[in-house]
Amino acid sequence: MKSHGVVAAGALLVGAACAASNTPGIVKWDIQRQHRRQELTRLGKRADTYEEVITNEEMRGGYFATCQIGTPGQPVTLQLDTGSSDIWVPANTAQVCRQRGSGDGCAFGSFDPDASSTFEIVGDGEFDIAYLDQSFAKGDYITDVFEIGGAVLQNMTMGLGLNTDIDHGLVGVGYPTNEAIIHSTDNLDAMYPNLPIQMVNQGLISTPAYSLWLNDLDASSGNILFGGIDTEKYVGQLTRINVYPTQRDPDIWTSFLVALTSLDAVSPSGQDRLSSRQFPIPVVLDSGTTLSYLPTDIAHQTWREVGAIWAPEVGNAVLPCSLRNSKGYFSFGFAGPSGPRINVTMDELVLDLTLGPQPKFTSGPYRGQEACRFGIQNFTSPPFLLGDTFLRSAYVVYDLINHQIGLAATDFNSTDSNIVPFPSEGAHIPSATPAPDQSQVTQTPSFSTPAYEASPGFTDLSAWPSETDNAAPGSAPAFGPGQVAVVGLTMVLTMLGSGLFVLL
Ligand SMILES: *[C@@H]1O[C@H](CO)[C@@H](O)[C@H](O)[C@H]1NC(C)=O
Ligand SMILES: *[C@@H]1O[C@H](CO)[C@@H](O)[C@H](O)[C@H]1NC(C)=O
Ligand SMILES: *[C@@H]1O[C@H](CO)[C@@H](O)[C@H](O)[C@H]1NC(C)=O
Ligand SMILES: *[C@@H]1O[C@H](CO)[C@@H](O)[C@H](O)[C@H]1NC(C)=O
């Protein structure tokens, strides 16, 4: 997620009209085995899909794709980010890549422009991007050949990070209106065709759209599918909901901002409808963010349901790691009462704090137990973020033309595949039905305190101090001093390119 915007995402614009709906005639498309490279040599506008395996790098807190840049191709492993819109790669000469001895500081790869015969500088010193965690990259805009998932793009505009504190590049697949060049020039005309657009321009896919399947927290990989959906990667119905513009008159869409309209805590002991003064909550679906961030009032309710407590040492709500075995789950509702729901189970919401043994609570109700990070954290102002802790439980289709998101429950660990390409430019998401009554997404009336009937079912621990709803439950845990240092280090690593510490 990028840190600043010409167009600031404000409160959710409610009751907005649906984007133009020009449903095309049904096009019967023969499902073909997935084509990769052989399709690319063909002339003409034959559209296809391109699938890239993305690996879950737990230590770095993100999903990474293996790409190639230049001629001959130089392999680089880049973090996939739906919350930003530029591809960029650290230069081999960047300090961060040279730091650790003999130029191996960027283990995920860096780019040597001198070794590419197709490299060109198109914006000398014009590349300048900053992420929410205050990490940054600066350098030149360049063009070169770019390969991802077997799709080869000629003349792809990218950033070359000459000066950066991030030791790996990113592949931002968000709206071109969110490119760094637009923020730094404050001018929409500076927009260039970024990856999804360039894939269409070069006839590789028919419409700027892709599907993201992150899979289980315990699984090492998921995939991104450009130009199509895979009906075997989700269960139940795929539902289309509206993406809201971040600016009105004229409408400009810069991020995948959708309306979160309900949140339930469900466990064997009961079900609670959680409450927020900010419903409908504007949330951005952001694969570049590890955790999820909701308004403080409702975040605190989720903590109370599961017994999470605020840990100032790590700046996060934490809970006993054993709660990953809890039978409870949270049910996220979107786009109104008839919209899609995504259930997120506790095993997806309890994350390790460190790679090695977890630090232990040294005091408080959980004394002696291992401490983990909770997947739902609090934040003070919109837009709020649904990051990987939410996205893993959903199959998400991003349609950048119709400004719609397709949502369905993920099919964890599915090994089957049935790929359906978008038939044409501007076509709606295949196999998806629109959420009904989205115009009824309106400001919700009142705030009411949940009864916390689900809470005992999340955890047997009854040593809960009773608190008011807006106070964080429990008192801060104390960690052993040695352990805190370890925690701090990991935080820095996992926050790179993904954290959330600066307000928009
Ligand atoms: C390459 O891309 C740039 C930026 O999008 C564009 O201005 C230029 O015309 C393109 N060049 C070729 C040869 O296609
Ligand atoms: C998916 O696979 C991983 C790794 O094999 C496993 O740990 C996990 O339990 C599986 N998840 C489900 C829901 O089957
Ligand atoms: C999600 O949770 C809700 C609320 O408990 C339930 O009604 C629904 O059936 C669940 N959906 C799935 C796909 O399990
Ligand atoms: C989150 O909640 C904790 C505990 O109430 C509070 O100390 C912290 O400032 C909050 N963070 C944000 C970003 O609101």
Image (cartoon, grey):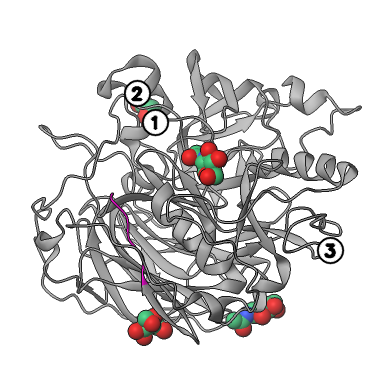
> Considering only order in the chain, which callout, 2 or 3, is on the residue closer to the N terminus?
2
Residue 271 found in image quarter: bottom left
Q: Residues within 10 Å of mark 1 (few under 14, many from 20)?
A: many
| Residue on which the image places disc 2 | 182
Which kind of residue does numbered mark 3 sit on?
Answer: Gly
Q: Main secondary structure of the magenta part?
A: loop
Residues at badges 1 and 2 in contact (C-beta under 8 Å)? yes
Q: Is residue 267 found left or right of 96 in the rendered image?
A: left
> Considering only order in the chain, which callout, 1 or 3, is on the residue closer to the N terminus?
1
| Residue on which the image places disc 3 | 368
Q: Is residue 340 found left or right of 152 in the rendered image?
A: left
Q: Which residues are magenta?
A: 273-277
Which kind of residue does numbered mark 1 sit on?
Answer: Glu
Which image quarter holds the C terminus?
Answer: top left
Residue 50 picture location, percent across and down = 47, 61
Which kind of residue does numbered mark 2 sit on?
Answer: Ile
* The image quadrant in which ligand 1 is located: top left
Q: Is mark 2 within 8 Å of ligand 1?
A: no
Residue 463 found in image quarter: bottom right
| Residue on which the image places disc 1 | 179
Q: Identify the element where label 3 is drawn.
A: loop
